[in-house]
Amino acid sequence: MMTSRRRLLATTVAALLPVRGLAQETPPPLAVARFSAGDLADWERERFSGETIYLIEPFDGTMALHAKAVGTASGLYRERTIDLRATPIVTWRWALGQGKAGLDPRQKKGDDYPLRLYFVVKRGLFNLDTIAVQYVWSLSQPAGTFWPNPFAPSVMQIAIDDTTSPRQRMVQHSRNLRDDFQRLFGEIIDRIDVVAIMTDADNAGGISEGWYGDVSFQAA
């Protein structure tokens, strides 16, 4: 009888212990942009007004994507589903070259940026209910300010850097994108579908220039 009881107790204790190899592992970082490796695979071009020049070249000790718009607006995008429940933290590097200061970003005439990084959620019939968060380097608004894009109110823009940030060298940022979607749209977003970048100068004219480094997602 005692042997049976000891066997039952041992079986019960073993069932309550965590099983090796079944513990939830932290997902590895997901590289979305690998410009430092000279990789532009799976990135497609979207033209709005003329062609912004995008070239991978050496910058600040590494390879980066150099973007220069002279009165033009075109972007690069990559369709890639990212699970924000598993990897909500987006990390990227970018550097400012030049751009027109003092523009009003809430007016269409002022919607030009040396650096933009988009995160898009496709939804609805024909993607008519698509929403997006856009991080920008603003030369008119202080970092932390946010506002709707004047051409597309379903795109919310956040100034990540401003005129006080250093120029001509890479600056690294990390943001909880899932938290930003919730704060800006009042809803929990579990996934994004597209990552895009754009440097443009078509609305106010002049030159916008910047460099994009790698972009990746990781667990919180």
Image (spheres, rainbow, N blue to C red):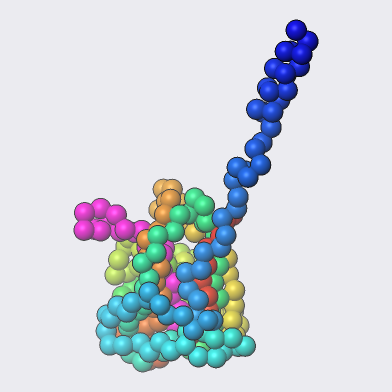
Q: Where 179 sits versus 72, above or below?
A: above
Using the image as rendered, state which of residue 171 and residue 165 is in the foreground: 171
Q: Can the viewer see residue 48?
A: yes
Quadrant in which the N terminus is drawn? top right
Give how far across and how far down residue 160 sits, in percent: 52, 70
The stretch drawn in magenta includes residue 127: yes
Q: Residue at x 59, y 81 (%)?
A: 170
Side (left or right) of 162 relative to 195: right
Magenta residues (range): 109-133
| Rendered image quadrant of residue 50 | bottom left
Which is nearer the eye, 28 or 180?
A: 28
Image coords of residue 139 (percent x, y)? 48, 80
Image-based side of 190 in relation to 126, left or right: right
Asked whether 29 or 105 is in front, the reply is 29
* Res. 179 in view: no
User: Which quadrant: the C terminus?
Assistant: bottom right
Residue at point 63%, 45% (across, down): 21
For this orientation, the residue located farthest to the top is 1
Q: Position of residue 7 (x, y in %)?
A: 72, 18
Tell me if residue 191 is in the magenta stretch: no
**Residue at 69% over, 32% down:** 17
Q: Residue furthest right?
A: 2
Q: Residue at x 65, y 27 (%)?
A: 15
Q: How many numbered discs, if any?
A: 0
Q: Position of residue 86 (x, y in %)?
A: 52, 52
171 sits left or right of 116 in the view: right
Q: Foreground: 90 or 49?
A: 90
Q: Quadrant of residue 205?
A: bottom left
